[in-house]
Image: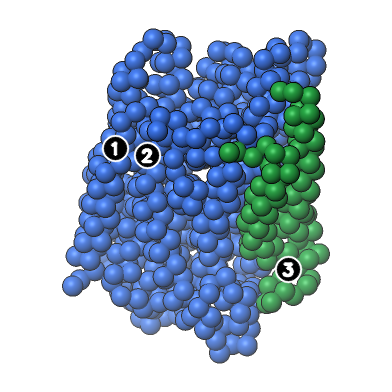
Chain colours: A blue, B green
Amino acid sequence: MDTQTLIYLVVGATFALYIGIAIWTRAGSTSEYYVASKGVHPVLNGMATGADWMSAASFISMAGIIAFSGYDGSVYLMGWTGGYVLLAMCLAPYLRKFGKFTVPEFVGARYYSQTARVVAVICVIFISFTYVAGQMRGVGIVFSRYLEVDINTGVMIGMAIVFFYSVLGGMKGITYTQVAQYCVMIFAYMVPAIYISMMITGNPIPQLGFGSEVIGTGQSVIERLNGLGAELGFDAYTDGSKSTLDIFAITMALMVGTAGLPHVIVRFFTTPTVRDARKSAGYALLFIAILYTTAPAVAAFARTNLLTSVPNTAYADIPAWFKTWENAGLIAWMDKNDDGIVQYGPGTPFAGNPTYSGETGPAGQRLLSNAPAAGATELYVDRDIMVLANPEIAGLPGWVIALIAAGGLAAALSTAAGLLLVISTSISHDLLKSNIKPDISEKGELLAARISAGVAVVIAGLFGIYPPAFVAQVVAFAFGLAAASFFPVIVMGIFSKRMNKEGAIAGMVVGLTFTFTYIVYYKFIEPTAGANEWWFGISPEGIGTLGMIFNFIAAVVVSRITAQPPEEIQHLIEDIRVPRGAGAAIAH
Amino acid sequence: MSGSKQEAAAAYWKENLQLMLWLLVIWFVVSFGCGVLFVDQLNAINFFGFPLGFWFAQQGSIYVFVIEIFFYVWKMNQLDRKYDLHEE
């Protein structure tokens, strides 16, 4: 069977599985729809959280980003895992004890203020839409790459699938689909990683192979990477190019942002008990760590492989995978000095993404119509290739390539579905039920949740089809804003009895305004500004850290000069601090 | 809540905060300490084929995070029972 047929088969089978699960677990009540009746086993919830959390970017792009940035890529590894420690110890058990459905609901109750709740809803919707726009585009890209349809058709197929299981099944449907998606994803990631680790180091465990000797060289993987890179003029793989303060700020913003992202927090509302909420954070991180500790190993292997087999090789002798991915536009060679040999070094070979002129050159390479850039390097490599080309590089059969396709789709769909659910919940529960129409029946609320999920899917799909020019640059937004808004407000809500409504609102407004302004200014108004112009040399990606600090300061100062929170709030805080009395599943 | 129950809750909270603080110190040291601030110094040490600082930044900190959460879960379950505040 050829690879394309296998891809259709495997992807089709996984889709059938997801839809089957959606029908089997469809939600009948708001509690099922919002939080899966708080009946999800911690191990399963951990898997669902892992799938929810790991997007197409984690699955396909992260290893590539690390491969090309070396040590600097560590910010993502530490940042996107360390947040779970904060979640497990500072947020999850207490929010579970609070026992409601949404993050704005907690903010509104703890700060006895409808205004605070509305501010929180706006943050949730903004953060989640920012994030989901990128996901839908990712769905389209993965579809188009594997199913030979164009990106827009891909987005529409993705919309239809997500629509089906999020509208029908709500949180319950999404949770069990995500469990299946996690399994597909991790299997698809690990199989090629194990093979490539064995191929390069002889060690089947990628995390250990990462530190082992490259077969036949007497050098460890890292020595070899640093050595090969130095020959070509690259900085050492283990040294960073960013300032220490910037690395610190980005890592912190990603960690705190992770702990403040509404679609992650809400997952801990679905466990049966407070104990399970803690445990489930542990399982979530364990399942995420399997992929996140493999990714840097894959990055190192793929880069070693690229640096040994491509630079200074005549195009005629180039490995076969090079040509496959050249056809897909992910790797390109412009023979600037007409010697028929691929030269590779730091810098870009030409301006923009490769555009092929349709002709082939003397060596058989596809010619490009891009304007050549200064510098000797002739090779364009898309970072996604580091994961996508692995099965071919390792000489794996077609079904592994099909698995990667299914894995990439699982990663993108699961994250999109989780985000869309948070958006629909905020609208039906926090805006409609609590503000506009408090007397709505449960049936009516459930219908409203489904309609808003449907509308959100369509809007997200439109973002995917007509991506705003800034989509790629706004991931910093989601994390920065979550770090500067929700995290401080929730943490102080639990750990400080003195924190009041005025303090919380002041903190959120200060943190948000500052972070928003800084990112907009340095991303869109002055995008060419570099480290010298940035405050303390902190890039927009890391500015959420400063926003979070300002939020804390503003909140503490304002709360000290305004009235204490009322008596019943003090009792509420005392109550959420202890596990007893969390109650079993609602509506069972 | 009656007096003794309130005292138990207060003592429970104090122990919880202490545990949390220690774990946050470790969290900070393995990531921001070993992986960011002192990465260059630690890179001089070879650890199973890795420069140590680099290993902490790309592998070690993540392993420690996972262990920390499970330790926290175990310890908190003990605390819940010690102060009789666990869920029935």
Which of the pair A541/A345 is nearer the observer? A541
Cα gap from disc 2 to disc 3, whole angstroms: 43 Å
Q: Residue at x 43, y 61 (%)?
A: A186
Residue A554, percent from left and from top: 74, 22
Mark 2: which amino acid? Lys
- Name the quadrant containing residue A558: top right
Kindly identify which numbered label has been placed on residue A26: 1
- Indicate the position of residue A290 as horizontal and vertical percent values: 52, 61
Q: Amino acid at mark 3?
A: Leu
- Rendering coords of residue A283 (x, y %): 54, 53
Chain letter of disc 3?
B
Give whichever of discs 2 and 1 has the lower sequence position.
1
Q: CA distance from mark 2 to mark 1?
A: 7 Å
Tag 1 secondary structure? loop
Mark 3, secondary structure of its residue: helix
Front: mark 1 or 3:
1
For residue A572, which quarter of the picture?
A: top right
Q: Give the amino acid type for the residue marked by disc 1 in the picture.
A: Arg
Please state which of residues A316 and B7 is positioned toward the viewer in this rendering: B7
- Quarter of the figure that contains the N terminus of chain A: bottom left
Say what secondary structure mark 2 lies in.
helix
Which label was assigned to residue B52? Answer: 3
Asked whether disc 2 touches disc 1, contact meaning CB atoms under 8 Å apart, the reply is: yes
Point out which mark residue A172 bears: 2
**CB of mark 1 within 8 Å of CB of mark 3?**
no
